[in-house]
Amino acid sequence: MIPQFIIISVLLFSIGLVGVLLRRDILIILMSTELMLNAINLLFVTFSRMHQQIDGQVFVFFIMTLAAAEVAVGLAIVVMVYRRLKTTDITKMGRMKG
């Protein structure tokens, strides 16, 4: 049962990594980052259960807190950039220099 969770976690992380590397829309990149963090959470819980320790599950709460802060700050930045540029394409955000 445990190896299936590890495989699912690796697949979820890979999908998130592909989304971060290949997409240009900032909202898709933020969602892909969340997917990678959830894959890491699943892996921590799996290893915590496998070794009968609670350390991994406690660390998941810290990652969830980090993810919530990332969403709050990230979406605030996206809204401000969208108001100024009328796009969420990261290639067009390069002209905001200076």
Image: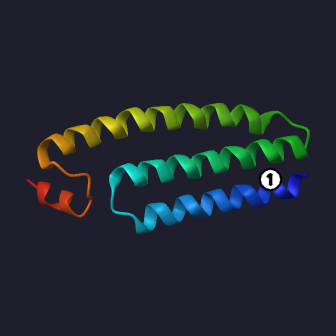
Locate residue 93, reporting x and y percent.
Answer: 20, 57
Placement of 46 over or under 23, stated as above or below: above
Seen in the picture, residue 17 relative to 57 is either above or below; the reply is below
Residue plotted at (53% across, 62% down): 17
Give x and y (percent) for residue 96. Answer: 13, 54
Residue 30 in the figure: left or right of residue 49: left
Which of 72/82 is in front? 82
Please say which color scheme the image uses: rainbow
Q: Outermost residue toward the front?
A: 86
Kindly identify the residue that appears in the image at 34 percent across and 52 percent down. 26
Query: Which quadrant of the figure has residue 83?
Result: top left
- 79, 50: nearer the viewer: 79
Please report the residue visible at 82 percent of the width from the left and 33 percent of the height from the top.
54
Q: Which is nearer the eye, 51 or 24?
A: 24
Circle 1: residue type? Phe
Q: Residue at x 37, y 49 (%)?
A: 27
Report the side of 82 relative to 39 (left or right): left
Q: Is residue 41 above or below residue 17?
A: above
Q: Whole-percent x and y of residue 51?
A: 90, 44
Does dot 1 land on a helix, a strand or a loop?
helix
Residue pushed farthest left? 98
Dot 1 surroundings within 10 Å: few (below 14), some, or many (20 or more)? some
Q: How many marks?
A: 1
Residue 8 figure quarter: bottom right
Q: In this figure, which residue is indicated by the disc labeled 1?
A: 5
Instruction: Tell me if 9 is positioned left or right of 76 in this view.
Output: right
